[in-house]
Amino acid sequence: MVCERCGGTGFVSRGDGRVDLCECRFSKEDLNRVLGIPKRFWDKDLDNYIPETEEEQDALFQAKVFAETFGEEEGFSITFVGPPGVGKTHLAVGILKKVYREKNIKGFFFDTKDLIYRLKLLMEERKTGRAIRRILDLPLIVLDDLGSERLSDWQREIMAYIISYRYNNLKSTVITTNFPLEERQGKTHGLRLSERIDPGTVSRIYGMGKVVYIKGKDRRRIGELKLWDEGNRRSG
Ligand SMILES: Nc1ncnc2c1ncn2[C@@H]1O[C@H](COP(=O)(O)OP(=O)(O)OP(=O)(O)O)[C@@H](O)[C@H]1O
Ligand SMILES: [Mg+2]
């Protein structure tokens, strides 16, 4: 079957005279590597995110709208908030792939902690200029698991730098986090993100775009239970 994207030529135009190699010339592995997607998520896509709750349905809808309306110059961002295992990272990966396929824009996936360490190394090597901007100027980045661990002062500073750079320069960011940005409807859901990173950073996250709260089951547990069940039935 001839590739719909490139008509079999192997190249797609960026619209500005430049061309890129078409995705059909990439193996699945290459595509995932280009976008920096961790191996566990190589098969994940918006098409195989199956929503069960209303919130999950809305989250999928928002993810699709975000990818479909993505504009490189607009700096619109999306933040997924929810407990472990509801598919936040899955959705973020799906967005990266859809934006790449449909808009030909290469984003990159970062585990937030990992990005903080990468930037620290670059800063220590005094590569403050271009090397850091090459990362921070990417048109789309995923900051996965923001606030997953308590940050030290220097880590908070770098975090604040990343977000304020993205905010000031109208760069789009997909954030996933376990922590609500603030108290919701008077209820405290354990820790809030504003207790983990600067309130100013949280405020910028609001200013960058949409915040989507997801409620649902921990799919990791369901997966494990199913495997355990099947294993038991086979051996029993
Ligand atoms: N709605 C869904 N449909 C299909 N698979 C799902 C769905 N939700 C979660 N999963 C799968 O469950 C696993 C856990 O999802 P994921 O890692 O995206 O959760 P998370 O919300 O990012 O959790 P954490 O906050 O712990 O990082 C993954 O394998 C993911 O593909
Ligand atoms: Mg995750």
Image (cartoon, helix red, strand yellow):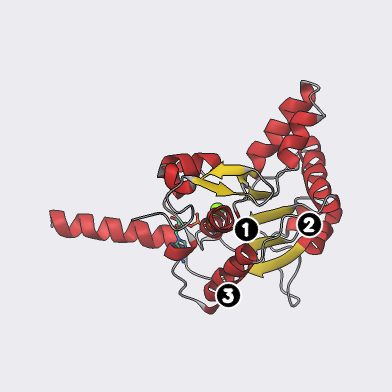
Picture disc at residue 58: 3
Picture disc at residue 178: 1
Q: Which comes sooner in the sequence, label 3 or label 1?
A: 3
* Element on which disc 3 rests: helix
Q: Say if disc 1 is inside 8 Å of ligand 1.
A: yes
Q: Which residue is depicted at the point 67% across and 61% down?
A: 70
Q: Which residue is depicted at the point 28% across and 56% down?
A: 228
Q: Which comes sooner in the sequence, label 2 or label 3?
A: 3
Alpha-carbon span between mark 2 and mark 3: 25 Å
Which amino acid type corresponds to the residue marked 2 in the rendered image? Answer: Ser
Which amino acid type corresponds to the residue marked 1 in the rendered image? Answer: Asn
Q: Which residue is depicted at the point 78% across and 50% down?
A: 197
Instruction: From the viewer's perspective, tell me whether residue 93 is left or right of residue 2.
Output: right
Instruction: From the viewer's perspective, tell me whether residue 6 is left or right of residue 135.
Output: left
Quarter containing the N terminus: bottom left
* Element on which disc 2 rests: helix
* Element on which disc 1 rests: loop
